[in-house]
Amino acid sequence: MTKTKLFTALALAGLAQAASAAPPIDFSGYFRAGTGVNARGGTQVCYGLPGADTKWRLGNECDYVIEPNFAAKIASHEGSDWYVHFMPSVYRAWGGSEFQTSLSPGDQTVAGSGTTELVTRFGQVYAYGNKIAMLGNGKVWAGRRFYNRLQLGINDQFLENNDGDGAGIEDIELGGTAKLSFAFMMNPRDLDTANNNRFALPIRVTGIPTLPNGSLSVYVTPSAQLESRNQVTGTDPADQPKGIAVGLYQSINGTLGGSTLVGFKHDKQGEVKNTRLVVQQTGKLGAGTAWDLIGEYRLNTNNGVDSKWYSLGGRTDTHISGPLRFLVELGTDQVKTDGGPTRNMTKLTLAGAVSAGNEAGSRPTIRLFVTHAVWNEAARQTLSGRLAEVYADKKSGTSVGIQAESWW
């Protein structure tokens, strides 16, 4: 055997051995990306009413989101499995730029060079062990992660969200289907000073049996400031009030061919209070059409000034033939603030889609859409950003685009 053949054989044998010794990796993730134009000329703009927390996302997402997840099982011990989880992610609104930072003398951050390219960062990096008998078959974890996310899908709204750096124990079995989770979380982006940050202690109990085919979830999240005197400047951070948030969410399966979610949440931090009521209903119309309807009311009180927000919208997703689908989404929002005029906006999207399957959730999917929104004069006066750049003198606007979306 020649030296070249011998080295090649040894290299292949080494690669084979390394591959066989590598830990198994679960690959999952989510992405959406696309392009579009506005009817007046220029890049697609997206429509949202100032003061409302929804965007009715179909044909109304002017961003890139790329979130591949890799979970590698690296050990087992006494029936538990141990993993490391990585999620390199990209998020950016269309037309934006990524601004890097560099350190100047004295460790002061300064603006660095910008780039129009998509820049990857790690949205999640954590280790965990699950099925731990001494923790009620629960999971222990630490690192940076998406945590406590409870989402209303068609408007991309989070009813609960405690993303950040932290650690906790999750899904401790309490008997039956009920499970307990708790964690310590901090904001990883609040890094201007080491003397001031905020922590939260999210606690949740899920799967509490209540109604037939129904269960209740309870979320309680106290929060408070962590502060000390800056020994360089001799100054104290501005005081922040303590906070408490309580959320109750009742789910019922099998209603109208789908499921029902009824939620209530009250969030208080000092003189700022937010109370919300939300109902979501999913179902089917015949064999080919899935539908999703959301209604919400929110009362925000800031130092005695009330702002009321009403929201109602829904989506239908109909299988036409083969991979072809047709979608319609209609949503309306109204915001009324004490002493101010009532603002409202209504948005309609029609979309044709090609999907890898016959179900509404089949992915990947590629959609061609047209989105039209109308708003009143009070809303026009509060428009900002890219929407104002194109339609600040109008009370309606239209965008056309194509988007790909998938999860796996």
Image (spheres, rainbow, N blue to C red):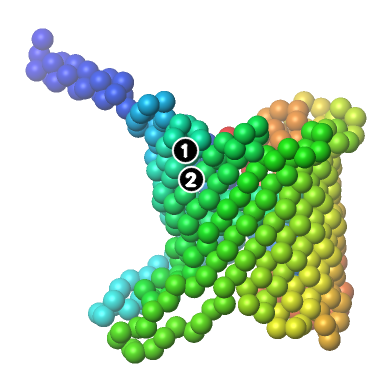
Q: Nearer the viewer, residue 385 or 167?
A: 167
Query: Callout 1: 10 Å neighbours few (<14), some, many (20+)?
Result: some
Query: What percent of the width, then of the height, locates residue 285?
Result: 90, 34
Query: What percent of the width, then of the height, locates residue 223?
Result: 55, 66
Mark nearer the viewer, 2 or 1: 1
Is the residue under label 1 in contact with that under label 2 (CB below 8 Å)?
Answer: yes
Check disc 1 and give the amino acid type. Leu
Residue 36 visible in image: no
Q: Secondary structure at mark 1?
A: helix
- Is 11 on the left or on the right of 276, as rendered? left
Report the number of numbered marks.
2
Please name the residue shown 67% across and 60% down the image: 246
Query: What percent of the width, then of the height, locates residue 119?
Result: 45, 57
Query: Callout 2: 10 Å neighbours few (<14), some, many (20+)?
Result: many
Determine whether 259 is above or below 36 in the image: above
Please name the residue shown 48% across and 45% down the image: 169
Pointer 1: what residue?
135
Q: Nearer the viewer, residue 262 or 137?
A: 137
Q: Nearer the viewer, residue 228 or 383?
A: 228
Check disc 2 and give the amino acid type. Ile
Query: What percent of the width, then of the height, locates residue 299?
Result: 78, 70
Determine whether 164 is above or below 298 in the image: above
Pointer 2: what residue?
169
Mark 2 vs mark 1, CA separation in Å: 8 Å
